[in-house]
Image (tube, rainbow, N blue to C red):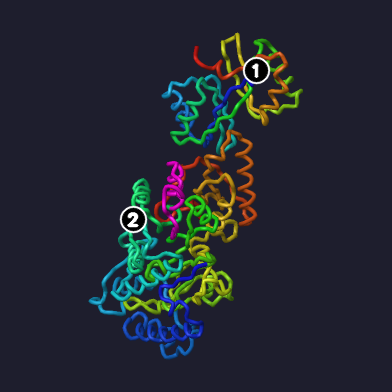
C-alpha cells in the first residue's frame, strides 16, 4: 500500500497530541457557543453545565445533545456563532416534513471542509493528475459543491456533471478520460448497468480508477458488485450537511472502516435510547461535535446514523479514529413481528445471491407482513420455472436466517423497480396501525 | 438432431402482461404455432413455439424482456384417443423427465406435435431417435 498524505502533520499526529488538540478546540468551541448562541447558553444552563466544567474530553458527557429539532429553534439564523456578514454560503438538508435544515458556512469553514476532502482524496491514492466527474446534485445539497471545492483544492480537474442523464455521463467519461467518480451507490449501480448494456468494457473503453460513493448507506456486497462491474476501487464516503457535508468520514485503501478527522470532529457513539456511550465496538448512534467550524458549530449532534468504532490500528498509518460503514439510520429501522430490521441487512443478503439484479424494494403492509420484491438478473433466466422457484426459495431462506423473520419474496423483471438517482427509497411502509 | 427452439419469457403476474408480449410478435409478423403459460403465484414463464425463433428472441431482448431460448423435442401425435398417452408413455419408459410442454397443431384434425423440454436434450434424442417417431425440426416451422 502506497502511503501519501495531504497534511501529514495532522494526519499522523500521535493519539496523545490528537487528544490534546481536540481538548483545546473543544474548550474553545464550547466557550464560543455559550457566549454567542443564546439557544446553546439556555441548553447548557438547563443542563447545569458551563464550558469551564470541561477538563477532559470525557467531560463532554455532561453536555446536552443537539438534535435536528434544535436546528429549528430561532430558525433560520439562530444557531449562528458569527455575524451574518461572515457567512458566505447556505446549504440545506431536506427534513422529512416542512422546512429544510439550514446550515451556514463561513469562508474559513468552506476551505477547512475542502481540506478534509483533499486529505481523503489523497488517502485513496488520488492526485492533481486525476479527473473527477462529480455526479452528485449541485445546489442546496452539500454533496456536490463541498466535494467540488475539496477536489479543486487538491488540484484535480473537476467535471461538474451533476446527477442524471446517464448517456451524457458516459460520454463525459469517454471524452475526457474521467478517472474518479463521485455519486450515490444506487446511481452507480444504474450507471454501471447502462455501461454494460451498451457493450462497453470499462477496462478498455474508460479510464476509471476510483469511485467515491456516499449520501446513502450501502452494503459491502454492493461495493464489490460496483467494483467488479466497473473495474475500479470503490471508497465509502460519509458526511452530513450539519457537519459540513461529505468528507466527514472517508475510507482509506484498507477499505475497512472510515476515518473521521479528529482534529475537526469529536466522535462519540451512544445508545440511541439512553444517550449513554456504548461499549467500544458496539453498534450505536454516531454523535459528532464540530471542533473546527466557525459559522455554526454543533455540540454533540445526534446524526441518527448507526455505526460502531473500529479500534484496530490502521495499516495506512493514520491515527484518526475509524467507524464501520453506516449500518442504518436510527429512523430507517423498522420493526416487523417485534424484530428490529435495517434495510441494509436485507441488501447484504440479496447482493450475495447469484441471480439477483441490483434493485429491490421492501414493502410493509397489512398486519406486519413484509414483502421483498427482487429484480432477477436477465442473464440468470434460462426459461426454467424450477430455477426461478429455487431462487425464490433461496432468497426467502437466507433472509429468514439473517433477520429472523420469514418474508414473502416476489421476483420481478429487471428494470421494473424504481431506481432513484438520489437517496434510494427502498422501504415502503403501507401498514396502518 | 431434429429439434425446435422454444422462446421463454419471464413475466410478473399482472394484467396486460400477455398482451404486451404477444404485441411484440404481432408487430414483428412472427407467427405463434403453440404456447404455454406456467404461473407460480406472483410470476410465471410464458413459452412460445414460433415460426422464426431467432428473430423472436432478438425482438424480445431488444425491448428489454427477460427472455431465453431453449431447444425442445417435438414428436408427432396420432389424432385418435390415446394418441398423446402413447407418446408420453414411451418417453417416460425411457426415463426422460418432461420439464415443460406445449402442443403444436400443424394441420387441424390431421397433424399435431407434442413439443417438450427436458433436462438433457442430447440424451433424450439418443434414447428416442430410433423409436419410429416423426420429429419436428426448425425447418418445418417456416411458413410455407
Residue B45 falls in image quadrant: top right
User: Could you say which disc has been placed on residue A162 in the image?
Assistant: 2
Pointers 1 and 2 in contact (C-beta within 8 Å): no
Would you call the spot at circle 1 few (<14 residues within 10 Å), some (14-19), or many (20 or more)?
many
Q: Relative to residue A393, is residue A216 depicted above or below?
A: below
The answer to whether residue A32 is left or right of residue A200 is left
Q: Secondary structure at mark 2?
A: loop
Pick the front one: B42 or A212: A212
Residue B71 place in picture, x, y as percent: 60, 27
- Chain name for mark 1: B
Residue lying at 64% horizontally and 16% vertically, measured from the top left: B135
Extreme residue toward the right, this view: B93
Alpha-carbon distance for marks 1 and 2?
59 Å
Residue lying at 67% horizontally and 10% vertically, measured from the top left: B80
- Chain name for mark 2: A
Q: Secondary structure at mark 1?
A: strand
Magenta span contains residue A392: no
- Read off the residue under disc 1: B75
Pick the front one: A338 or A8: A8
Extreme residue toward the top, this view: B110
Q: Relative to residue A320, is residue A257 depicted above or below?
A: above
Residue lying at 29% horizontally and 68% vertically, measured from the top left: A90
Magenta span contains residue A211: yes
Residue A24 place in picture, x, y as percent: 42, 86
Is residue A99 among what the camera can see? no
Q: What span is colored magenta in the figure?
A: A188-212
Residue B68 falls in image quadrant: top right
Residue lying at 37% horizontally and 86% vertically, measured from the top left: A31
Amino acid at each position: 500500500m502506497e502511503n501519501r498524505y495531504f497534511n501529514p502533520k495532522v494526519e499522523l499526529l500521535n493519539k496523545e497530541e490528537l487528544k490534546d488538540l481536540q481538548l483545546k478546540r473543544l474548550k474553545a468551541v464550547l466557550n464560543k457557543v455559550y457566549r454567542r448562541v443564546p439557544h446553546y447558553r439556555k441548553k447548557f444552563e438547563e443542563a447545569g453545565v458551563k464550558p469551564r466544567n470541561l477538563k477532559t474530553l470525557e467531560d463532554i458527557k455532561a453536555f446536552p445533545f443537539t438534535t435536528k429539532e434544535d436546528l429549528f429553534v430561532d430558525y433560520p439564523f439562530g444557531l449562528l456563532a458569527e455575524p451574518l456578514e461572515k457567512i458566505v454560503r447556505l446549504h440545506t438538508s431536506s427534513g422529512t416534513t416542512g422546512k429544510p435544515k439550514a446550515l451556514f458556512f463561513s469562508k474559513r469553514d468552506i476551505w477547512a471542509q475542502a481540506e478534509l476532502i483533499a486529505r481523503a482524496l489523497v488517502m485513496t491514492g488520488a492526485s492533481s493528475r486525476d479527473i473527477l466527474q462529480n455526479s452528485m446534485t449541485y445546489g442546496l445539497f452539500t454533496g456536490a459543491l463541498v466535494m467540488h471545492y475539496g477536489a479543486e483544492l487538491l488540484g484535480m480537474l473537476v467535471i461538474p456533471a451533476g446527477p442524471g442523464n446517464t448517456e451524457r455521463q458516459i460520454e463525459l467519461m469517454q471524452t475526457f478520460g474521467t478517472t474518479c467518480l463521485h455519486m450515490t451507490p444506487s446511481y452507480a449501480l444504474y450507471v454501471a448497468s447502462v455501461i454494460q448494456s451498451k457493450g462497453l468494457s470499462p477496462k478498455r473503453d474508460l479510464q476509471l480508477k476510483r469511485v467515491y460513493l456516499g449520501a446513502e448507506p450501502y452494503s459491502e456486497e454492493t461495493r464489490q458488485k460496483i467494483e467488479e462491474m466497473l473495474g475500479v476501487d470503490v471508497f465509502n464516503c460519509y458526511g452530513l450537511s450539519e457537519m459540513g457535508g461529505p468528507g466527514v468520514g472517508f475510507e482509506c485503501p484498507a477499505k475497512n472502516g472510515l476515518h473521521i478527522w479528529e482534529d475537526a470532529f469529536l466522535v462519540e457513539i451512544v445508545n440511541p435510547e439512553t444517550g449513554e456511550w456504548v461499549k467500544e465496538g458496539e453498534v450505536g448512534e454516531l454523535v459528532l461535535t464540530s471542533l473546527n467550524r466557525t459559522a455554526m458549530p454543533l455540540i454533540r449532534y445526534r446524526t441518527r446514523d448507526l455505526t460502531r468504532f473500529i479500534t484496530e490500528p490502521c495499516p495506512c498509518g493514520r491515527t484518526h479514529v475509524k467507524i464501520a460503514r453506516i449500518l442504518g439510520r436510527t429512523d430507517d429501522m423498522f420493526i416487523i413481528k417485534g424484530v428490529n430490521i435495517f434495510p441494509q441487512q436485507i441488501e447484504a443478503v440479496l447482493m450475495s445471491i447469484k441471480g439477483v439484479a441490483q434493485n429491490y424494494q421492501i414493502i410493509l403492509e397489512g398486519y406486519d407482513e413484509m414483502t421483498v420484491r427482487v429484480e432477477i438478473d436477465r442473464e440468470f433466466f434460462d426459461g426454467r420455472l424450477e430455477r426461478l422457484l429455487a431462487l425464490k426459495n433461496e432468497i426467502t431462506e437466507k433472509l429468514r436466517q439473517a433477520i429472523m423473520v420469514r418474508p414473502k419474496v416476489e421476483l420481478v423483471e429487471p428494470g421494473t423497480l424504481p431506481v432513484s438517482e438520489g437517496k434510494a427509497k427502498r422501504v415502503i411502509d403501507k401498514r396502518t396501525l | 438432431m431434429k429439434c425446435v427452439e422454444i422462446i421463454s419469457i419471464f413475466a410478473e403476474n399482472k394484467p396486460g402482461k400477455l398482451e404486451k408480449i404477444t404485441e411484440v410478435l404481432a408487430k414483428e409478423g412472427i407467427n405463434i404455432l403453440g404456447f404455454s403459460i406456467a404461473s407460480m403465484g406472483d410470476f410465471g414463464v410464458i413459452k412460445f413455439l414460433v415460426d422464426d425463433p431467432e428473430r423472436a428472441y432478438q425482438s424480445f431482448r431488444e425491448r428489454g424482456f427477460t427472455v431465453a431460448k431453449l431447444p425442445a423435442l417435438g414428436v408427432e401425435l396420432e389424432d385418435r384417443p390415446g394418441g398423446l398417452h402413447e407418446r408420453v408413455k414411451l418417453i417416460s419408459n425411457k426415463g426422460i423427465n418432461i420439464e415443460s410442454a406445449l402442443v403444436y397443431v400443424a394441420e387441424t384434425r390431421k397433424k399435431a406435435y407434442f413439443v417438450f423440454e427436458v433436462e438433457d436434450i442430447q440424451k433424450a434424442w439418443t434414447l428416442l431417435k430410433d423409436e419410429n417417431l416423426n420429429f419436428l425440426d426448425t425447418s418445418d416451422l417456416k411458413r410455407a
